[in-house]
Image (tube, coloured by chain):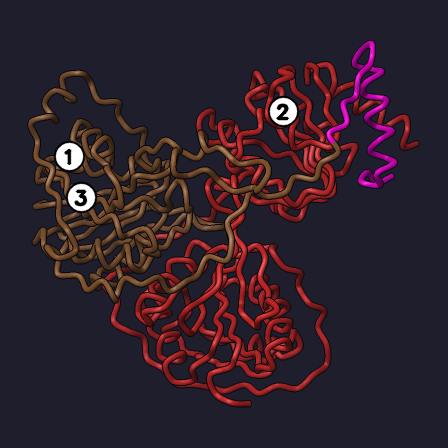
Chain colours: A brown, B red
Amino acid sequence: MKRIIVCLKQAVDVTQLKIDPATRQLITASAPRKMSDFDKNALEEAVRLKEKNAGEVVTVTVASEEAKTVLREALAMGADKAYVMFEPSLQDVDTLGTAHILAAAARKIGEYDLVLCGESSLDSFSGLVGSRLGELLSLPQITSVRKLSIEGDAVVGERTLEDSIETVRARLPALVTVTREINQPRIPSLMMIMKASKKEIVTWTLTDLGVDKERLASKVEVVEVLAPKTERKRIRITGENAVEIAGKLAKALIQEGVVKR
Amino acid sequence: MSEGKGVWVFSENADLTLEMLGKGREIADKVGAELAAVVIGSNVADWANELVKYGADKVYLVDNAVFGRFQAEAYLGVLHNLIVNYKPETVLIGSTKNGKPLAARLATRLEVGCVPDCSRLGVDEKGRLVGERITYGGNAVAKLTFKTKPQIVTVPSRAFEKPQPKKRSGQVVKLDLKAEQAKSEVVETKPLETSNVRIEDAEVIVSCGRGLEKKEDRALLDELAGVLRGQVGCSRPLAEDRKWFSEWVGLSGHKVKPKLYIACGISGVIQHVAGIRDAKVVVAINKDEQAPIFEVADYRVVGNLYEILPALKEALKKQLQ
């Protein structure tokens, strides 16, 4: 292996997202961010492949704001070099635009054997960017991979489909998207964190990449993004003991007509 | 019917194809377009004819031994070729593990937008196609529309009703297309051990979370589900961390819409809640009064599931007699 490129997103930590109850708008601006979960699995897998087959692991991140924490974490986990495509104007970029930037970065980085991505991102959860990137780079791809190995000039991935498990072989260079089942990402030791501070973070702008901004214009329009309305009754069922509670609950469910005789 | 207005559906999954034909018919009628299905496979002519009964005005049939099984690059080449030639305005693709990457690559080859996993889909008062999808880990529902055409959406299983077959007429267009050369191949396929019954179809689901102490204790849920003629489900930690189940309910697992969902010992993280959004009645049983599941439940029981479940089973047996 010469080089593995891992795409990392700095995602909104959805477990810490706040919602304005009056407007049902999400307060994303102040929400904490972190490395997207699936991407962390992709990075872990890349580092494991490097440990087995040698080579270099580099990460690529598209960011409209500071992403240093994520990049430092990636380096501490074992990446050799982190690239960040930083441009504050990138806020209205959709999955195609993101893929265009990643593709330009991959081309500029140079030769690679494998591009690894998470199956989806933690926040937008579209699951499109990996495949879009594969198409732009004309790479064969294996998606939703839960087991991965390199065999000669090919990558072999095991993926879970709706009713079967499939093993796919793709010629290198290839693109692979991984699920969370594939591994348990390591927690970097203090030593690894210290070592990481000496590793290089490279920042590129769209001009550096030679990407035409026009081409990045979003192809979809967001009509609205709102917290779902929860219209639940929230009736508390109380009683002296389990039998009394169960009796009341059973009665309520029968009255609702959701229990068949 | 003029070119460039068609609504198309494609999935390698039969049920999903029919579900999308139902929704596709509705969209096509609203915008005054023709509804077409694309069928790619080997010996699939009968299936193509069948689709007319489910609402297709036209079926583009690509029947060739080389397409006998789903092959990402080959199917992509065929769909791309057809779209460039016939210029549909809207394309619905089944959001399966194979279908979604196919849609993503197709949209990229065409340089257009794609809205994945639309749990709702419709045409708004301005005549725009609007897809609704869950995002931010279940914290929000996003409504999206398109700036480019064709508009490509992916549709998950069971999001829409399968239409009733009717006697109607339509045209099957046979096409002779070659397979694009592939750089990847499927080397092995093993069936996945899943229950024959799909949890998306269940009318009643009794589901457990981390409050379940031992794997064997699922017997408690099985017994209650037996009385209710329902199925047993679980939240993600029980499947992914403890490996007690192979599948789970939630945003990253199965999105369900039963009449009754009983969440036992499930804390109710937002990703789980997103998977039960369409349940008619939600019951939450949890020891922890502060558990977020109570915020999204119709009936709240603060208590020990090990006491409540057996009692509930007995109470239901008695009252249902």
Whether the residues at callouts 1 and 2 have beta carbons within 8 Å, the answer is: no
- Give the answer, above or below, for where A153 lies relative to B166: above
Is residue A252 highlighted in magenta? yes
Residue A244: which disc?
Answer: none
Q: Quadrant of residue A71?
A: top left
Instruction: Name the subunit of mark 2.
Output: B
Element type at mark 2: helix
Q: Most extreme residue toward the bottom, as rendered?
A: B1
User: Which residue matches tag 1?
Assistant: A79
Nearest to the observer: residue A191 or residue A44: A191
Q: Residues within 10 Å of mark 3 (few under 14, many from 20)?
A: many
User: Which residue matches tag 2?
Assistant: B218
Q: Are marks 1 and 2 on the same chain?
A: no
User: Which residue matches tag 3?
Assistant: A84
- What's the amino acid at mark 1? Ala
Is residue B212 highlighted in magenta? no
Earlier-in-chain disc, 1 versus 3: 1
